[in-house]
Amino acid sequence: MSKTSHQTVLITSSCVHFSIYLAVDSETTTLIKSAVGKTVLLRCQNVQGKRVRQWLQPTVTDKGYYSETLTDGWSVNTNLNNYNRLRIVGGENGNQYNLEISNVTKNDSGKYRCTIEGANTTSYILKVNEPQSTTLEYVPISELGDTSSVDSISELKDDQPSKM
């Protein structure tokens, strides 16, 4: 999981001594794969007593880096096109602050980050793919011939000439 480490840097000058407290964020990112139309749950550990908790979707474009706020506290950002497919799973008094995305689309692919004031950052990369299709072959019963001694469909297929 991710962790935040803090370093104190002492800068000395002939006239002033002061410390700068730097937060160095080192996070791990988990890859989640899903098919279009499924529901995805991104997990985040809630910390009691913390006021700021958000799910963000960071994006890098040719114009720079920005983060879109998906949730702020326990509310979903209703300015988002997909807001009706997002919800927080967990409770204000519980230890979970999970983001559920229902009926995922390829547009939902990307990075997601859970931030909780004073706690570790949890990040995911969601990759949404088209569902795998299954091709079924239709053979009319009349073309199967005598099936009285057949134990399985594979025996039928192997014995019958294919028709196109």
Image: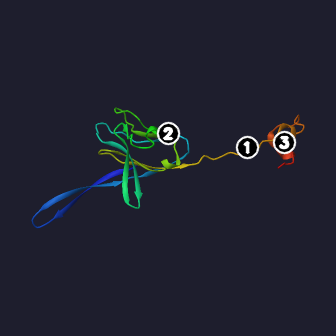
Q: Which of the labelled discs sits on residue 37, or is there none? A: none
**Helix, strand or loop under label 1:** loop
> At which x and y percent is residue 51?
28, 39
> At which x and y percent is residue 49?
28, 37
Q: Amino acid at mark 2?
A: Ser
Tell me, yes or no, whether the two marked residues, 2 and 3, touch with CB atoms within 8 Å: no
| Residue visible at 35% across and 47% down in the picture | 120
- The earlier-in-sequence mark between 2 and 1 is 2
Tell me, yes or no, whether the two marked residues, 2 and 1, touch with CB atoms within 8 Å: no
| Residue visible at 44% across and 43% down in the picture | 81
Q: Quadrant of residue 118?
A: top left
Q: Residues within 10 Å of mark 3 (few under 14, many from 20)?
A: some
In the image, 135 versus 122, the foreground residue is: 135
Q: CA distance from mark 2 to mark 1?
A: 28 Å
Residue matched to label 3: 156
Residue matched to label 2: 102
**Helix, strand or loop under label 3:** helix
Q: Residues within 10 Å of mark 2 (few under 14, many from 20)?
A: some
Tell me, yes or no, whether the two marked residues, 1 and 3, touch with CB atoms within 8 Å: no
| Residue visible at 21% across and 57% down in the picture | 20
